Image (cartoon, rainbow, N blue to C red):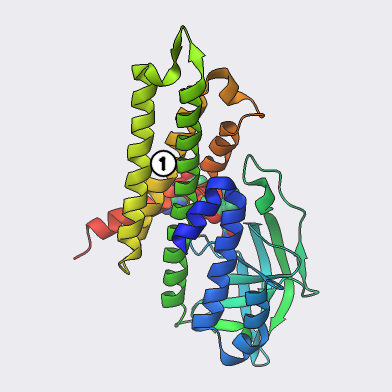
């Protein structure tokens, strides 16, 4: 799955992020959903009739949940939910007495309001919308994990998100490297192809080193349950994507700054990698905690 997301991101990072979010919610329902929730949503998610989106498992809870009539009532707002399509199913973390609640909210619910997509620097097709819940009523079946039991699925969601962002970022980095390598092969200046200049060769080599390093860290993190390893992979990949895309713009020279060439878009998309799935400094905090763990 991670390799497929990386390949998709090579061509269009928003498509890769959308597929990643959808897959994450589908697998959350399959693995942790109550039987009635699986019955109600899994086949529609698998068919793509219902589209998954998620609130970052890292942030503060903007939505409050109150127990009522054997179910829950939700009030609050979640900014910038990527892939929040009208036919969407939102995996949401809400705060409740006794701890966080992890639940599934159909965006078609009358008590849900989705804003038009925010104007963003990059990842525009991902369509980030603020979603507001005004007294959404959920039956117990829509709760994936109640207060006191949500820590583990939330941890799993956060780790999965970090690995998926690492995969999207590696795809952007690889695309930047490939475009820069190909351009340096054909562009001639001062009687030489760009690829013959040491400054260009070193840039290409540094891009290749960072992208390969990010991919290796992701493979290592995917093979172990440790959340800190996923954070390491996520931050390294976000930095590799930003580095490679910035260097690609430089290799293209003035053309790199122009919309008609592919690399300025990669640079705009790359910046989102240090925010999506939790800001990099939040991940650094978790890595530092892990360094001091017994
Ligand atoms: C393209 C894109 C897609 C997104 N998609 C989604 C989505 O699908 N679902 C969703 O729920 N959210 C989504 N988000 C929101 C994203 O998860 C948040 O923007 C991100 O977690 C950062 O939170 P914030 O914007 O509130 O920044 P803040 O938390 O206010 O952080 C601001 C700065 O302070 C730093 N900071 C904050 N806390 C700490 C700390 N404890 N230690 C050190 N530094 C800290 C941060 O690193 C950052 O540099 C998306 C954002 C973007 C840009």
Instruction: Look at the picture and state if 74 lies above or below 4.
Output: below
Determine the residue located farthest toward the left in the rendered image.
294
Q: Is residue 145 visible?
A: no
Which residue is at a point 61% across and 59% down the rendered structure image? 18
- Residue 53 point in image, percent of width and height: 62, 65
- Residue 64 point in image, percent of width and height: 62, 72
Instruction: Look at the picture and state if 129 lies above or below 149.
Output: above
Left or right: 111 as drawn, with respect to 163: right
Which residue is at a point 77% across and 65% down the rendered structure image? 113
Near-viewer residue (210 or 103): 210
Q: Secondary structure at mark 1?
A: helix
- Residue 171 point in image, percent of width and height: 48, 47
Residue bearing the label numbered 1: 239
Near-viewer residue (231 or 11): 11
Which residue is at a point 22% across and 63% down the rendered structure image? 293
Q: Quadrant of residue 50?
A: bottom right
- State the quadrant of the C terminus: bottom left
């Amino acid at each position: 799955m991670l390799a497929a997301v990386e390949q998709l991101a090579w061509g269009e990072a928003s498509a890769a992020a959308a597929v990643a979010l959808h897959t994450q919610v589908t697998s959350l329902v399959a693995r942790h959903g109550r039987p009635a929730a699986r019955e109600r949503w899994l086949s529609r998610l698998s068919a793509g009739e219902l589209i998954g989106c998620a609130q970052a498992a890292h942030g503060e809870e903007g939505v409050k949940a109150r127990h009522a009539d054997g179910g829950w009532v939700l009030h609050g707002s979640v900014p910038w939910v990527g892939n929040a399509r009208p036919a969407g199913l939102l995996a949401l973390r809400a705060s409740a007495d006794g701890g966080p609640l992890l639940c599934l909210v159909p965006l078609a619910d009358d008590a849900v309001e989705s804003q038009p997509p925010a104007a963003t620097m990059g990842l525009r097709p991902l369509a980030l919308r603020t979603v507001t819940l005004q007294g959404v009523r959920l039956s117990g079946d829509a709760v994936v994990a109640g207060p006191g039991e949500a820590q583990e699925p939330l941890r799993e969601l956060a780790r999965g998100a970090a690995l998926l962002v690492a995969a999207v970022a590696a795809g952007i980095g690889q695309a930047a490297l490939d475009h820069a390598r190909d351009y340096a092969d054909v562009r001639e200046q001062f009687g030489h192809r760009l690829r013959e200049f040491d400054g260009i060769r070193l840039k290409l080599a540094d891009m290749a080193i960072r992208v390969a390093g990010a991919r290796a860290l992701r493979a290592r993190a995917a093979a172990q349950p440790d959340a800190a390893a996923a954070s390491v992979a996520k931050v390294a990949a976000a930095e590799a994507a930003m580095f490679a895309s910035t260097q690609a713009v430089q290799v293209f020279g003035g053309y790199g700054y122009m919309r008609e060439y592919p690399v300025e878009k990669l640079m705009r998309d790359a910046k989102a990698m240090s925010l999506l799935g939790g800001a990099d400094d939040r991940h650094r905090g978790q890595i530092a905690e892990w360094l001091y763990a017994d």
